[in-house]
Amino acid sequence: MSDQIARILIVDDDPIVTQSLAEYLAEEGYDIAVASDGAAALEILNRSKPSAAASPDEPFGVVITDGNMPVMDGLHLLRETKNKHPDIVVIVLTAYATVESAVECVKEGAFDYLTKPVVDQELLIAVQKAVRQQALIAENHTLRSQLDTRFGLDNIIGADPRMTRTYDLIEAVAPGKTTVLMGGESGTGKSLIAHAIHRRSPRRNKPFVEVSCGSIPETLLESELFGHVKGAFTGAHADKIGRFLAADGGTLFLDEINSASPGMQLKLLRILQERRFEPVGSTETVEVDVRVILASNEPLEELVASGQFRQDLYYRINVVMIDLPPLRERIGDIPLLAEHFLRRHCEEVGTQITGFTAEAMEALQRYDYPGNVRELGNIVERAVVLTRGQTITLDDLTQNVLDRGASAITADNCQATGLPWLGDDGDWQPMSLRQALEEPERQILLAALRANDWNRQKTSDELEINRTTLYKKIKQYGLDRLAG
């Protein structure tokens, strides 16, 4: 709204007052409409039809209303306006000012309360403040919308069955305050998942605070999380609010929790159980209402077995586990993710690129992504910035992608080395070393399934594997597409 003419509705049963206020504020550059009573004002607001002077989709931002009017008085209009149009800022004018009436108006949501006859400069200052307030409200809506877009489920890309289960878990856990633990390599999207849980929870309008425990020195992590009082240690020149208190009412995401020291693990166990703590150097106990989401880039169960992570803390945080697979294990999602990043970065730099050449996409799918989804996003961003054509080609990709792609085994050297990589139609296909190692298992499973007419129970019995394991292997190798 800050870039548009601010629209103001003046409501008063005295036509001389409305005309005077309208002319004065119009001279100050505002777009003015008038109404003679509260009922007429509500009708205008409900229509929300701006004049030609305003943007076609710009609603009213401010209402200036008399407090004493027939049909519907100012207080009633205030209530109805805040109920039906909560973003509109309301200023109440009255010739019968009392402390009680002022307090009541403020309680009902009035932005300001002025006494008639209103001094022009006093009114102008109140209107200017109201317009700025409305602009802040509109900006907050825009920012929330951007957050919903950036961290909504639509922004988490993947058709892999494991990602589908992740979407279901997000929907299931978001409404409550259950502690969530995420596992997965760096770059698999744990922060994005944490944001998505927060944005879909009742805490969405409260703070989301993220702490990367692995990037903060152990000596400072306690102060960072719990805060400290002045003089608690050398360099503590003032009180500091910790991240737990900053996230009060909202969500705290503790990433790389596997790096926390044994002492810090004990403190975390206490706050997760009691939701209370003492800042460093203080004896005062602070209580907080925080939903905690944690993530580890190392398997915590292995750290528990080796004595590096407290078993009691592990059981306390492992209420709901979301395990994010590395990108190399969901190759089928690479085209979806690449196209997603392409659209995003094209919008950011203001360019139009239609897509990837077949060779470029094949190279992207052959690469093993040690940096996972984050690395793919960086690769696509670089390609968008550097390309001079309408499509991303091999020349636009990073050298490590090209080097890994060049090392993939081709049809000719497959046959030359006797490796058993066959397509479903019997033709030789390109593949990586990992695919070559997995192919014998795939071929055995496919042969057994076909021999048993795709009877999965009979196949699992014959291969002496668990039925659930067979189902996972069928999904992993895409054999379900070949059934029937």
Image (tube, helix red, strand yellow):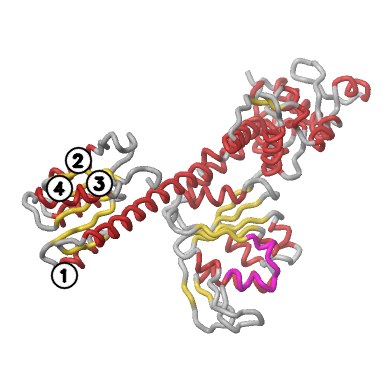
How many numbered marks does the figure carry?
4
Residue 48 in which image quadrant: top left
- Decide which of 249, 69 is in the foreground and name it: 69
In the rendered structure, find residue 44 and report the number of the disc placed on it: 2
* Residue at x 69%, y 25% (from the top left corner): 389
Q: Name above or below for residue 164 compared with residue 311.
A: above
Q: Which residue is mark 3?
A: 26
Going from N to C along the chain, the mark reached first, 4 or 1, is: 4
Q: Position of residue 111 (x, y in %)?
A: 27, 59
Q: Position of residue 318 (x, y in %)?
A: 59, 58
Going from N to C along the chain, the mark reached first, 1 or 2, is: 2
Side of 28 relative to 182 (left or right): left
Whether residues under marks 1 and 3 lie with C-beta atoms below 8 angstroms apart, the answer is no
* Amino acid carrying mark 4 in the image: Gln
* Amino acid carrying mark 2 in the image: Ile
Label 1 secondary element: helix
Q: Name above or below for residue 202 compared with residue 462.
A: below
Q: Judge the density around disc 2: few (<14), some (14-19), many (≥20) Cα neighbours within 10 Å.
A: some
* Residue at x 64%, y 82% (from the top left corner): 233
- Decide which of 142, 260 is in the foreground and name it: 142
Going from N to C along the chain, the mark reached first, 1 or 3, is: 3
- Decide which of 121, 79 is in the foreground and name it: 121
* Amino acid carrying mark 1 in the image: Glu
Going from N to C along the chain, the mark reached first, 3 or 2, is: 3
Provide the major secondary structure of the magenta segment.
helix
Q: Magenta residues, as a range?
A: 212-225
